[in-house]
Image: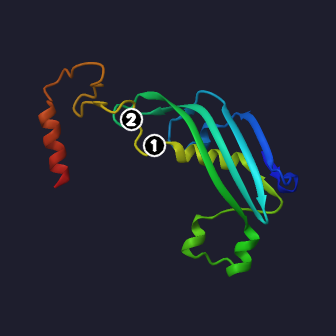
């Protein structure tokens, strides 16, 4: 969804809608949207900068890193970003980025890709180590049994698991 920056009036521009996004846009492998993306966005122009404030809501199925079972992650997030014209970067240093400018977000021409911004915000919301529950017991390293649902049928005990991880730490 492209937004023409010339349509942003002095009062700003408000957009409230739903959007279907392809699962391939998610950075977490094997994740999928369980609901459409609901969003509210307010855009304001401040000279050549565009201030974007928004809220996103959706539900994503994501795999737990310990037990590999999918669980529902409810996304309810707010964001505030400022977009700068890419021409500003080119004028300042002819394409050489300095460390301060690496955190800037740029738009090119007269249009802003709102869908790209929304996808980025969803991916930033995803946890780096997704867990289905804080005390997830994971899988038995010997037989693969999900220890959240049943006792392990093999003789691999929790002490052996702890010992194995202690060896890795050294």
Residue at 54% from the left image edge and 73% from the top image edge: 99
Label 2 residue SS: loop
Depth check: give the residue in front, 21 or 152: 21
Q: Which labelled disc corresponds to residue 137? A: none
| Quarter of the image where the N terminus is located | top right
Residue at 12% from the left image edge and 35% from the top image edge: 159
Residue with the mark numbered 1: 127
Left or right: 169 as drawn, with respect to 135: left
Separation (CA) of disc 2 from disc 1: 9 Å
Q: Quadrant of residue 55?
A: top right
Contact between marks 2 and 1 (CB within 8 A): the answer is yes
Residue at 63% from the left image edge and 78% from the top image edge: 96
Location of residue 144 in the rendering, given as x and y in whole percent from the top left corner: 28, 28
Left or right: 8 as drawn, with respect to 142: right
Q: Residue furthest front?
A: 11
Image color mode: rainbow
Residue at 61% from the left image edge and 75% from the top image edge: 97
Left or right: 11 as drawn, with respect to 29: right
Location of residue 3 in the rendering, given as x and y in whole percent from the top left corner: 81, 50
Label 1 residue SS: loop
Location of residue 78 in the rendering, given as x and y in whole percent from the top left corner: 60, 43
Depth check: give the residue in front, 120 or 67: 120
Q: Which labelled disc corresponds to residue 131? A: 2
Marks counted in the figure total: 2
**Badge 2: residue crowd in 10 Å (few <14, some 14–19, many ≥20):** many
Q: Residue furthest bottom?
A: 93
| Quarter of the image where the C terminus is located | bottom left
Left or right: 157 as drawn, with respect to 34: left
State whether residue 26 is above or below residue 62.
Answer: below
State whether residue 104 is above or below residue 58.
Answer: below
**Badge 1: residue crowd in 10 Å (few <14, some 14–19, many ≥20):** few
């Amino acid at each position: 969804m492209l937004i023409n920056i010339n349509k942003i009036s002095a009062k700003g521009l408000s957009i409230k809608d739903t959007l279907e996004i392809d699962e391939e846009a998610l950075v977490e492998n094997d994740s999928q949207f369980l609901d459409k993306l609901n969003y509210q966005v307010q855009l304001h122009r401040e000279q050549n900068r565009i201030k974007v404030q928004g809220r996103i809501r959706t539900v994503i199925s994501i795999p737990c890193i310990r037990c590999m079972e999918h669980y529902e992650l409810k996304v309810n997030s707010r964001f505030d970003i400022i977009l700068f014209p890419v021409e500003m970067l080119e004028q300042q240093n002819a394409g050489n980025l300095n460390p301060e400018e690496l955190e800037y977000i740029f738009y090119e021409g007269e249009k802003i890709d709102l869908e790209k911004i929304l996808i980025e915000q969803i991916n930033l919301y995803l946890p780096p180590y997704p867990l289905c529950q804080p005390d997830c017991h994971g899988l038995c390293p010997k037989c693969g049994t999900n220890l959240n649902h049943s006792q392990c049928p093999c003789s691999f005990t929790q002490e052996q698991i702890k010992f194995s991880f202690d060896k890795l730490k050294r």
